[in-house]
Amino acid sequence: MTRSVRVVGGGMLALCGLVALGWLSRLPYTTQRDSGALVRLAWRTRGERVRECRHRTPEELAKLPPHMREDDVCEGRVLPYRLVVKLDDTLEADAMVRASGAREDRPIYVYHEFPLAPGTHRVSIDFERQGAPGEVENEERAEHEREETGRAERARRAEPGRLQLDTTLVLSDREIALVTYNADERRLVIREK
């Protein structure tokens, strides 16, 4: 096969591909039919940070190198929340939402989507803090706990321990109702898109 035949054949093949692509681009295409509506939960909260301490036993201390022998071991974390979502009196979600990070010491992120048929729907959301700080065993730790309680009280004022939303939504096809946390009003709000 000569070089000129290959060039002409390649040009014809490219031209046929271009014509086919142009023809295919004019065909009607729909991505989804009757996709329905959507309720989307999306917010971030700092949560309440707690510090839990315990006293090590003599056996535990003996296993540790001398430079690591501390009587008390303390760990900090953010208390989890329980998320309960009901749509039209049907339980859609009942889950513990924990803080992000390997030690659960980062903010809490909520992101869930619930598809619905277009129409009128009752939406009920309950987001409640779970758990309590650890026990105090000695006077030094009691002072530390009082400091932590003051910080926790400030956090409690900033972030409510319970957020609730109970409302009725009228959603059309392909409409999204966004449920998010409004920090200024300290409550869950709905934004429709």
Image: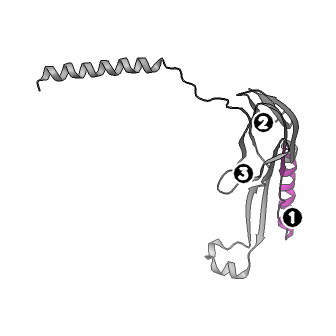
Mark 2 and mark 1 lie on one chain; the one further toward the N terminus is 1
Q: Tell me the SS state at disc 3.
A: loop
Residue toward you, 11 or 73: 11
Q: What segment carries the magenta color?
A: 125-154
The residues bearing labels 2 and 3 have C-alpha atoms spaced at a distance of 17 Å
Q: Is residue 160 shown to the viewer in this render?
A: no
Q: Which residue is mark 1?
A: 142
Q: Which residue is mark 2?
A: 180
Residue toward you, 166 or 118: 118
The crowd level at tag 1 (other Cα within 10 Å; few <14, some 14-19, many 20+) is few
For discs 2 and 3, the disc positioned in front in the rendered view: 2
Q: Tell me the SS state at disc 1.
A: helix
Give the residue drawn at x 13%, y 23%: 3
Q: Amino acid at mark 2?
A: Thr
The residues bearing labels 2 and 1 have C-alpha atoms spaced at a distance of 37 Å
Mark 1 and mark 3 lie on one chain; the one further toward the N terminus is 3
Q: Which residue is mark 3?
A: 99
Magenta span has 142? yes
